[in-house]
């Protein structure tokens, strides 16, 4: 499969904090999920790959273009769609005006062609009917769709989405997942998320990041398989478990190294994810 | 309607004329000259002349006649029928698409409309409309501060010096430029910084606009202090020097710390100059001829440094500094 993004040894420090530490990965067409607890470095990695901030060390290319040079950076940005974690909006703009503004930033200066593109992306995210409404009047889910429409302007080959489903209710989340799945057809999407459900439903591949380093890189099925034989049920929380929580049935679901004779359960992606993190990370994630 | 001969002129006020004409209130007689609508419209209702429809179908109709035809065609089935007969289907589809797009296009706000009226390209006007420091709240605050300062300064004339005004006026453009970009103040900064438009170009577009507004306000305030003559213009070169230095430092220190240091440095300089002043009537050192020369030199040097550091605004380094 053709590699769209190739990163090698990316490192970045903020003050004394190590946000990224020698991260290497290759991304190809389809949706790749980026999982990790708070502070794992997910947003930092996305911002580096989106060229919002340069790495201290390491390099990466997008479709062969190196953002380390001025020319390469512009070429990468021409092929990039980016939805930040908290997309900002100019409150006085309508949905159409905001996406139009982003289209101008993406060098679409011809008015007729630009407006055609704005209408296309607003239609793609299902916002044609509210395109004339001020963004401040739109719901949180609609605002996220406006931001996604802005990211889709220019039909980018590489789409970076930073936790786009956070704060959305279940129905909006499902709607957004459909949009991401559609956006992932024929392009490379890197989706940062806290939700293992997002990964299970959307991604052909998953990368787990913790402490600024890559802990896992493979398919969701491979991540799930990591928990095979390591998930069990008990009536009390097992102190030997890496993580454990009470389920709706009143019993505890434990992940870790099961005691002899434990009542083993079918593993899920979330179990595999928790086991991939070390003890401290697992506590945070659990 | 080449050159508006079909009644672009007759459609006074122009752009909405087409709609008015559909109810026949103006009629062909109002369309002075040649290719009036009466010939093809029949009855009292005006219709777009066939010649214009042919030009429309070819894409050769120009504004304002084009606007009238667009508006009228949206409401008149008869003219749409004639257009379908005379037009090339491909060109016709393009025309409908254009009409659809025009009806869909947002109406620009006050600032954007003003910039468009001044001849600015629509994409540049939209970029400026998104500049935080050009928003009404900021412009209003600047105007209020200046009015207050002018009022206080004017109350202390009688041979005095406009020191308060001269001290404050250079800080306003500096603050405006500092507030026109950066993650803390521009809600779309993150999207803008990863866009292919060069960050330095975006910064310069906004800086020039904010400087123009700031200097314009200061200029008006200067006119309100005629008693001080040319001395009241002593803020101009320091304003350029502070703004250029603030931006140059922002490239290394970030959009908040850089301009803030420059602002504090300016105030410290004035306090020092005040302490060193010998006569009560003498101007402070920055507002003497020598001081103005130094300001001009600093402005040029800082502008040069800014150009040298321009790539930092594009790479995201100015943000992380």
Image (cartoon, grey):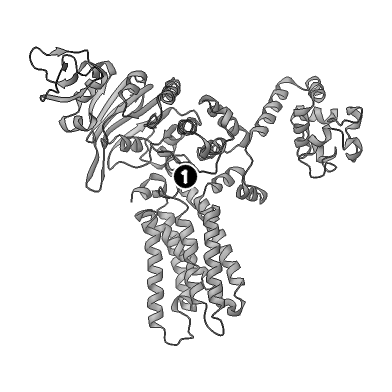
Image vertical order of residue B111 relative to residue A86, above or below: below
Q: Residue furthest bottom?
A: B279
Depth order, front residue of A69/A54: A54
User: x and y percent of residue A156 in the render?
Assistant: 46, 29
Q: Secondary structure at mark 1?
A: loop
Residue depicted at 31% across the width and 38% down the height = A44
Q: Which residue is mark 1?
A: B198
Pointer 1 chain: B
Residue drawn 75% across the image and 28% down it: B74
Residue B79 versus residue B246 in the image, above or below: above
**Going by the image, does B23 lie left or right of A44?**
right
Q: Is residue A5 above or below residue B278?
A: above
Residue A37 percent location from the top left of the image: 26, 32
Residue B211 in sight: no
Q: Position of residue B80 (x, y in %)?
A: 78, 24
Crowding around mark 1 (Cα neighbors within 10 Å: few <14, some 14 to 19, many 20+) is many
In x, y percent, where is residue A47? 35, 38
Q: Residue at 16%, 16% (x, y): give it.
A: A232
Left or right of residue B8, residue A23 in this image: left
């Amino acid at each position: 499969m053709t590699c769209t993004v190739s990163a090698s040894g990316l490192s970045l420090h903020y003050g004394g904090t190590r946000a990224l530490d020698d991260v290497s990965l290759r991304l190809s067409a389809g949706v790749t999920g980026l999982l990790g607890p708070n502070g794992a470095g997910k947003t930092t990695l996305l911002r580096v790959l989106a060229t919002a901030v340069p790495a201290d060390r390491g390099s990466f290319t997008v479709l062969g273009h190196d953002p380390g040079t001025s020319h390469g950076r512009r070429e990468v940005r021409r092929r990039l769609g980016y939805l930040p974690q908290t997309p900002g909006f100019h409150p006085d703009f309508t949905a159409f005006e905001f996406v139009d503004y982003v289209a101008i930033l993406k060098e679409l200066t011809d008015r007729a062609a630009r407006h055609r593109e704005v209408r296309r992306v607003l239609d793609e995210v299902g916002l044609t009917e509210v395109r004339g409404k001020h963004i401040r009047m739109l719901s949180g889910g609609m605002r996220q769709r406006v931001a996604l429409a802005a990211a889709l302007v220019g039909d980018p080959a590489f789409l970076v989405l930073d936790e786009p489903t956070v704060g959305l209710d279940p129905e909006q989340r499902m709607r957004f997942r459909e949009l991401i799945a559609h956006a992932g057809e024929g392009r490379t999407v890197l989706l940062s998320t806290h939700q293992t459900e997002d990964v299970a439903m959307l991604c052909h591949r998953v990368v787990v990041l913790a402490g600024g380093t890559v802990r896992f890189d493979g398919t969701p099925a491979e991540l799930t398989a990591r928990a095979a034989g390591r998930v069990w049920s008990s009536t009390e929380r097992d102190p030997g478990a890496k993580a454990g929580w009470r389920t709706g049935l009143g019993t505890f679901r434990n992940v870790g190294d099961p005691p002899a004779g434990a009542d083993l359960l079918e593993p899920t992606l979330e179990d595999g994810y928790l086991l991939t993190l070390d003890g401290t990370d697992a506590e945070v994630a659990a | 309607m080449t050159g508006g001969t079909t009644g672009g002129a007759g459609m006074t006020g122009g752009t909405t004329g087409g709609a008015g004409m559909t109810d026949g209130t103006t009629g062909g007689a109002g369309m002075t000259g040649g290719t009036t609508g009466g010939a093809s419209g029949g009855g009292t209702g005006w219709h777009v002349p066939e010649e214009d429809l042919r030009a429309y179908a070819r894409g050769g109709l120009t504004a304002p006649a084009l606007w009238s035809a667009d508006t009228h065609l949206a409401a008149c089935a008869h003219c749409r029928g004639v257009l379908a007969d005379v037009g090339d289907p491909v060109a016709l589809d393009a025309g409908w698409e254009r009409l659809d797009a025009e009806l869909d296009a947002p109406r620009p706000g006050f600032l954007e409309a003003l910039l468009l009226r001044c001849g600015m390209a629509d994409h540049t006007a939209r970029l400026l409309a998104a500049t935080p420091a050009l928003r009404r709240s900021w412009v209003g605050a600047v105007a209020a501060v200046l009015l207050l300062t002018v009022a206080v300064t004017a109350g202390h004339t009688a041979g005095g010096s406009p020191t308060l005004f001269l001290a404050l006026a250079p800080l306003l453009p500096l603050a405006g430029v500092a507030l026109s970009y950066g993650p803390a103040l521009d809600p779309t900064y993150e999207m803008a910084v990863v866009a292919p438009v060069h960050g330095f170009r975006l910064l310069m577009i906004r800086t020039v606009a904010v400087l123009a507004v700031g200097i314009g306000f200061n200029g008006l305030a200067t006119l309100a202090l005629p008693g001080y003559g040319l001395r009241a213009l002593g803020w101009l070169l320091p304003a350029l020097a502070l703004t250029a230095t603030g931006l140059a430092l922002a490239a290394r220190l970030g959009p908040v710390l850089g301009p803030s240091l420059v602002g504090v440095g300016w105030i410290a300089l004035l306090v020092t100059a005040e302490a060193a002043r010998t006569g009560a009537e003498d101007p402070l050192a920055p507002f003497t001829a020598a001081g103005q020369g130094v300001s001009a030199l600093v402005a040029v040097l800082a502008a040069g440094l800014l150009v040298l550091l321009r790539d930092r605004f594009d790479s995201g380094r100015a943000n992380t500094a």
